[in-house]
Image: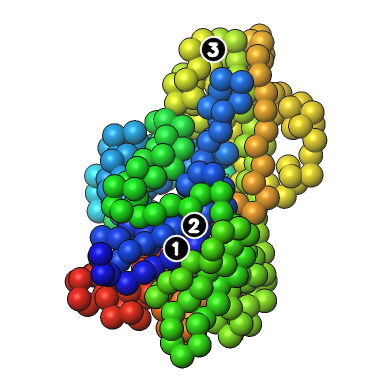
């Protein structure tokens, strides 16, 4: 083989995508990952026979790059995509209202469901519709939108705490991992426009029907090996150095020989990237720290018998944000396994497992009365303290693009400047952009026709 040598540092979705793209372009690729498995923030683990996802992950029809990656690694069959957006929303007492898109072009596809949305009084539904139309007209790429919160903008459009709690936070927390009150207007406008206001099919939701590692990490590892990518798992990259005179790069790790490469894609979380990048690669590496982080907590409850027929439901007026039935995906044969996903979970991060158990078992019983009389067989909590960067005002300005000051060294990660919030789609897009950048610096992108 004679293609350029590319080292990809980090085996999350960004690194996986970059490595596949470079290998497909004829590069000799090595991917290094500190953990013994691939998938990064998207993974599952086994606990006493139960397959537990670190946190519930959904995607949407508009996540074209992530869906193409699933196809590339042969995992589409382990996912499902709603034929039409449908989100049941449950309130204490059990009342369910379903948000369902219609067939009209966007944004009219949501008009009928909003007009019948019982958690808001009729007058407030019309106000929410007017605000949604105004949100759709914003220029999400305008840097001025990154200076204000989505919450302030909503308030100026007649959307107070009632509307935020009943409608806007239901979506903002799930997509941005912060509440509307805290979110940057720029990334919120992008997310709502892309998912809900631009194309009537964009927001149809995709689910992983098996444990996350079975859908992402393991198939990705097989696809990378089949593409000729050399994998160094359980290998921590400690420093990337530029070789003087434009002689490429060296990636040094905790053990073994350093890796020599013509180009490097750094696909690490922002704080790790700041520590591993060579001096001078980006201006103010401390700005990566300033991106901050936002946590996600998942509460996993296994009941002796099924307590709800709903496979997926959002919650209002309850600490339960979203519930997913993971019984089949996790291989549970008797009873029902519900996973409660809590985004923007700063308060829950500080709670003990016992306190979380009290809070969520009683909240679930308020939503699903059958749970009151059903024994909980197992209860566990997963916490991701830095699940995403904190998408607050100023964050867009802190996100660097793939290009660094050193030709051949490119940055990837859901936190880089993709325009997308920190999502699987953003990670895949960032990996592809970094691969293009790295390959073009070593004169390879044009030669092999890597599409821009
Ligand atoms: C609980 C949870 C729920 C989420 N829900 C959703 C959702 O529903 N929908 C959605 O689209 N997104 C969701 N996300 C966000 C999504 O998972 C991430 O944005 C995306 O997976 C990030 O991918 P990445 O490759 O940029 O980073 P990461 O996945 O963080 O990958 C970075 C990799 O670098 C490795 N690494 C770190 N240091 C080193 C080192 N020194 N040397 C070598 N390797 C190193 C890490 O081990 C990791 O594998 C969720 C995230 C979490 C945590």
Mark drawn on residue 8 = 1
- Depicted 62 relative to depicted 145: above or below: above
In the rendered structure, are the residues bearing label 1 and label 2 in contact, judged by CB atoms less than 8 Å apart? yes
Q: CA distance from mark 1 to mark 3?
A: 43 Å
Residue 430: image x %, image y %? 42, 65
In the rendered structure, are the residues bearing label 2 and label 3 in contact, judged by CB atoms less than 8 Å apart? no
* In this picture, residue 285 sits left or right of residue 401: right
Q: Is residue 246 visible?
A: yes
Residue 177: image x %, image y %? 58, 53
- Would you name the residue on which mark 2 appears? 32
How many residues crowd around disc 1 within 10 Å: few (fewer than 14), some, or many (20 or more)?
Answer: many
Asked whether 14 or 121 is in front, the reply is 14
* In this picture, residue 103 sits left or right of residue 362: left
* In this picture, residue 144 sits left or right of residue 207: right
* In this picture, residue 62 sits left or right of residue 171: left
Secondary structure under tag 3 reads loop
Mark drawn on residue 335 = 3
Labels 1 and 3: the sequence-earlier one: 1
- Residue at figure coordinates x 51%, y 49% from the top left: 233
* Number of the front mark, 2 or 3: 2
């Amino acid at each position: 083989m004679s293609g350029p040598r590319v080292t990809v540092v980090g085996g999350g979705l960004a690194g996986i995508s970059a490595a596949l793209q470079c290998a497909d372009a004829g590069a000799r690729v090595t991917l290094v990952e500190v953990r013994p498995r691939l998938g990064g923030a998207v993974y599952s683990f086994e606990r006493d026979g139960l397959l537990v996802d670190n946190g519930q992950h959904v995607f949407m029809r508009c996540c074209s790059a992530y869906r193409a990656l699933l196809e590339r690694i042969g995992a589409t069959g382990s996912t499902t995509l709603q034929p039409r957006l449908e989100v049941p929303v449950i309130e204490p007492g059990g009342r369910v209202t379903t948000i369902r898109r219609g067939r009209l072009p966007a944004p009219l596809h949501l008009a009928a469901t909003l007009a019948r949305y019982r958690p808001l009084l009729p007058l407030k539904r019309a106000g929410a519709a007017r605000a949604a139309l105004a949100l759709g007209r914003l220029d999400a790429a305008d840097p001025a939108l990154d200076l204000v919160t989505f919450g302030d903008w909503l308030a100026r459009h007649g959307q107070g705490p009632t509307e935020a709690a009943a409608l806007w936070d239901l979506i903002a927390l799930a997509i941005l991992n912060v509440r509307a009150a805290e979110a940057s207007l720029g990334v919120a406008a992008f997310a709502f426009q892309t998912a809900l206001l631009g194309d009537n099919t964009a927001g149809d939701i995709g689910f992983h029907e098996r444990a996350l590692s079975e859908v992402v990490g393991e198939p990705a590892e097989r696809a990378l090996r089949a593409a000729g990518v050399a994998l160094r798992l359980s290998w921590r990259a400690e420093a990337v150095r530029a070789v003087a005179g434009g002689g490429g790069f060296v990636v040094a790790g905790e053990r073994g020989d350093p890796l020599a490469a013509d180009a490097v894609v750094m696909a690490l979380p922002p704080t790790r990237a700041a520590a591993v990048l060579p001096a001078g690669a980006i201006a103010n590496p401390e700005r990566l720290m300033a991106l901050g982080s936002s946590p996600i907590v998942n509460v996993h409850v296994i009941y002796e018998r099924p307590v709800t027929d709903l496979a997926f439901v959002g919650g209002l007026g309850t600490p339960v944000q979203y519930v997913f039935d993971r019984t089949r995906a996790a291989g549970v044969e008797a009873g029902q396994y519900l996973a409660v996903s809590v985004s923007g979970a700063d308060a829950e991060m500080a709670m003990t497992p016992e306190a979380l158990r009290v809070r969520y078992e009683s909240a679930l019983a308020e939503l699903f009365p059958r749970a009151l009389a059903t024994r909980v067989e197992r209860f566990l909590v997963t916490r991701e303290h830095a699940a995403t960067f904190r998408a607050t005002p100023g964050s867009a300005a802190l996100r660097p693009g793939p290009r660094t000051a050193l030709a051949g060294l490119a940055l990837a990660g859901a936190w880089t400047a993709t325009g997308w919030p920190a999502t699987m789609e953003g990670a895949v897009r960032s990996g592809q952009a970094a691969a293009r950048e790295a390959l073009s610096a070593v004169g390879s992108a044009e030669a092999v026709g890597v599409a821009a």
